[in-house]
Image: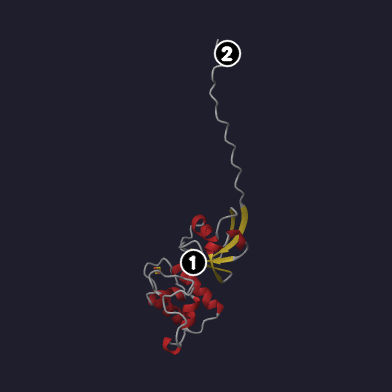
Amino acid sequence: MDTRLPATPISPAPAAAAPPVPLYPLKLNINGQQRQLHVEAWVSLLDLLRERLALTGTKKGCDHGQCGACTVLVDGKRINSCLTLALMQEGRSITTVEGMADGAALHPLQQAFIAHDAFQCGYCTPGQLCSAMGLIAEGQADTRAQVRELMSGNVCRCGAYPQIVAALADVMQLPDETQDGPATAPVGMVPA
Ligand code: FES
Ligand code: FES
């Protein structure tokens, strides 16, 4: 006689509920507006701006600190927003390209970029503009060659480098290129 019990179907154990993802409070001033946010620990400043706050002017190029497309100003200093966690900027003031113009009046750098045709596709332009603001605030560039060097972290795949330098030189009222002497790096080349 077969004494085995009839097989009973084994129902899978109920999946354990995933623990809630912790959110941390974050206070930022973004383009002059005070924001109270809650974010996960791993969110970069770039993703916070683009994905959570819809400030898509700031661009994601490499997401690895190599191209400068994500440049914004933090307390007036230019940084690659892909390389910093949003939570690390607690209490700071962030300026993105959306915060440059004064209402309908463009920032002088924006006007100069238009006047000098300093972009083609425009993908790098928000980062170039923020980087240019930071560079001017740093006060380290007295010649066009120095502008080229100090803007070399902002890559332009369209090769608008001569026009970008001309736009900055215009705003900074730098002397003509011919008075600068040899450049430390050819236009379009990003030093290693
Ligand atoms: S996206 Fe940040 S440096 Fe390229
Ligand atoms: S204008 Fe196209 S990447 Fe700079």
Farthest top residue in view = 1
Query: Can see residue 121?
Result: yes
Say which residue label 2 marks: 3
Picture quadrant of ligand 2: bottom left
Say which residue label 1 marks: 66
The answer as to whether callout 1 falls within 8 Å of ligand 1 is yes
State the count of labels. 2
Query: Can see residue 101?
Result: no
Numbered disc 1: secondary structure: loop
Closest to the camera, between mark 2 and mark 1, is 2
Query: In the displayed structure, would residue 185 be above or below residue 101?
Result: below
At a point 57% along the width and 62% down the height, the residue shown is 84
Farthest bottom residue in view = 179
Is 172 on the left-hand or right-hand side of 29?
A: left
Q: Position of residue 144 (x, y in %)?
A: 46, 82
Residue in front for this viewpoint, 16 or 132: 16
Q: Where is residue 86 in the image (x, y as percent from the top left)?
A: 58, 59
Query: Which amino acid is tagged 1?
Result: Gln
Query: Which amino acid is tagged 2?
Result: Thr
Q: In which quarter of the image is residue 35?
A: bottom right
Circle 1 packing at 10 Å, graded few (<14), some (14-19), many (20+), is: some
Q: Where is residue 58 in the image (x, y as percent from the top left)?
A: 48, 63
Circle 2 packing at 10 Å, graded few (<14), some (14-19), many (20+), is: few
Q: State the CA–CA distance, disc 2 to disc 1.
A: 71 Å
